[in-house]
Amino acid sequence: MSADRPTTMSAEEELESLRQRVDELERLLERQRESEAGRDELLSMLSYVPDTVYMLDRQGRFLYLNRVRDDFKISELLGASAYDYVWPDHQARFRDTIERIYATGEPQRYEIRAANTDGDWSWYSCLLGPVWRTGEIVAVAGAAANVDELKAVQESLERANDELEMRVAERTRDLEQANEVLRREAAQRLEAERARQEERRLLELVLDSMDVGVVIADRQGRLTRINPAAAKTFGVRPGNADGFQQRWSGAAYLPDGSGPYPADQHPLLKALRGESVGGEEILFLQETELQAIWLQVSARPLIDGEGTRYGALLIFRDVTLQKRALIALRETEQRFVSILENTPAVVYLKDSAGRYMLVNRAFEDAFQLPSEAVVGRADHELFDGATAEQLEKNDRQVLRSGQAYQFEETVPVGGVQRTYLSVKFPLPDARESRYALCGISTDINERKQAEERLQSEQTFLRHLIRAHEHDRQLMSCEIHDGLVQYMSASLMHLDCLTTEPQISKRGQNSLELARHLVRRSVVEGRRVMSGLRPQILDDEGIVSAISFLVAEQASPGELDIEYDHQVNFDRLDSLLEGTLFRIAQEALTNVKRHSKSAKARVRLQERGHHIYLEISDWGQGFDPANVMDDRFGLKGIRKRADLLGGRAQIVSQAGFGTTISVSLPLKPDDVEREPSASR
């Protein structure tokens, strides 16, 4: 036999080689079935997770989706840009998030607005992380809360698996006829296996990246998976099933904390029995951390394609912040009700149509009406026409302006008209719409009567002072026209006698003494006239009268007084002029007697509807709080200013002089009062 002759295989050897290839293919199929079983289990888990799971490339194109809307197919979205389904204002944020993951390799949390299952836009809380392959980030994968479309992905995968199995069956039947086809099919199977393993790793990454606690148990109740969020909530390692069970069992209480949570009602046990639990709240008291947390728990049985239960899925969210906010809101409401019911003021709420929504106990007591007889009714159903019209007019003003107002309102109570000081303000809702009005009314009937009595007394005092000034004016005129004139005439006769030669020396001395005494009497009479009411005040007005007073009080070398006036009026009411003069007179008298100051200043200014008088010195000063009770000068200044509706302010400090500032309305009847309705 030649060495170049090719060696041929016998039929038995070829059959043996073919059998070996078949065995190899069967082993590959067995590994594939095991991988598919694990993949089916993971997909089944994700079908119960209330989140959307997806994978994107760096350009934001969909590489994977676990569910989509009913009017889309996954095959239509794969390769499409996710930005098309993101709210336009959030696309830049989404793009920046993907780039940040590629740059840092760290998972990113963010909130985004995207299309939901109803074809509308919804908010999603997302966690997006990197997908590594051979040390490089090849994609990003994440989960978005509040999406329920994982089942569509599962159905799509099942159809793909069924199709793949049919293809495998066809290849198997053709194995004996086409060895090349067998090798190609085996290579395809190996590639598909690697893809499924990669997909399983991605799904596990998504599960571990979720901020929702996920726990899986097998049919015997053994915990087979605890994701990091669930482990972190209970302070155990993700694989520590025993620790998780102990923490759960020892810390679970009824939501109100009234007792331990029944062990036989454990949501996971219910799910193993075939029941579903949705959104049940459980309180957990962590004794070591001395804190309480509330979890919202859901559980469902895991069922395979044949309807057999093979485990249970437990999902929970931490709702502690929401629960505490609700508790705080209830406590605030209780405090509000306590204040409302115990305040002596009348408090009420009305809707925009004027119907009472709420009244407090003081309202019921004041009007002798139970709340049941008031709520739902309007003012015209409770009060007479005039009263109701007044109240409703004020309410409309508040609701129309959107601002708070203060009113004096008169309401009949027990057949007697009583006055209330009412503060009313609008209540806006979340959209800033004024849906209601709140009123707080205080009975000021006694205060109102006291104010009226005080006003009457002040009016009487003003008339009394006016009459007193008039009497002083008359007395001054009587002295001027009577006593001073007689004294002046007497002085003239005495002056004539000084020329008589027959008067002796002794007589001349007596005559000179008489002339001196008469002159002093004339001066004293004029001084008394000025003290009573200087004639210049009635003849020329307050500006000239104060100028006369300054000249009278100044002393060369002892007290220099500067007088500055800036006014537009010619004359004022006689009572106002008299008050200004008396205040200036009292202040300058105090400067001269007590301040020991070498100078003083008087300012008279007209500003708007008021006149301002200011007297200042640079003397030794005093403490206004320690003035003795028997000193009435400063009190008189304040009382005079108050009586005419003005204000008097006295500022002094030891060693720094004294300033008396007085503000009076130009018309004495313009006494400042609170308006009946004010904002």
Image: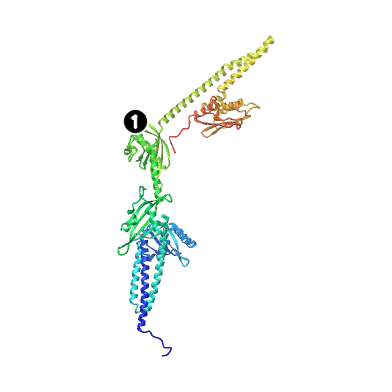
Q: Toward which corner of the image does residue 179 lie, by quadrant?
A: bottom left
- Name the residue type under label 1: Gly
Query: Circle 1 sits in a helix, a strand or a loop, which is it?
Result: loop
Which residue is disc 1 drawn over?
Answer: 415
The residue nearer to you, when weighing 10 against 464, is 10
The residue nearer to you, when weighing 21 against 87, is 21
How has the structure been colored for display?
A: rainbow
The residue nearer to you, when weighing 510 against 486, is 510
Left or right side of 149 for 647? right
Residue at the bottom extreme, as displayed:
1
Q: Position of residue 671 (x, y in %)?
A: 48, 31
Q: Quadrant of the C terminus?
A: top left
Q: Position of residue 141 (x, y in %)?
A: 43, 62
Q: Is residue 514 above or below residue 536?
A: above
Q: Toward which corner of the image does residue 662 lie, by quadrant?
A: top right
Q: Is residue 66 above or below residue 632?
A: below
Q: Is residue 406 above or below residue 535?
A: below
The residue nearer to you, when weighing 21 against 56, is 21
Left or right side of 319 for 538? right
Q: Quadrant of the N terminus?
A: bottom left
Q: Is residue 174 above or below residue 590?
A: below
Residue 433 shows in the view: no
Q: Position of residue 424 (x, y in %)?
A: 41, 39
Around disc 1, counting alpha carbons within 10 Å, would you say few (fewer than 14), some (14 to 19), or many (20 or more)?
Answer: few
Residue 164 shows in the view: yes
* Residue at the image point whose x is 44% and y is 60% from the top: 128
Q: Position of residue 207 (x, y in %)?
A: 40, 61
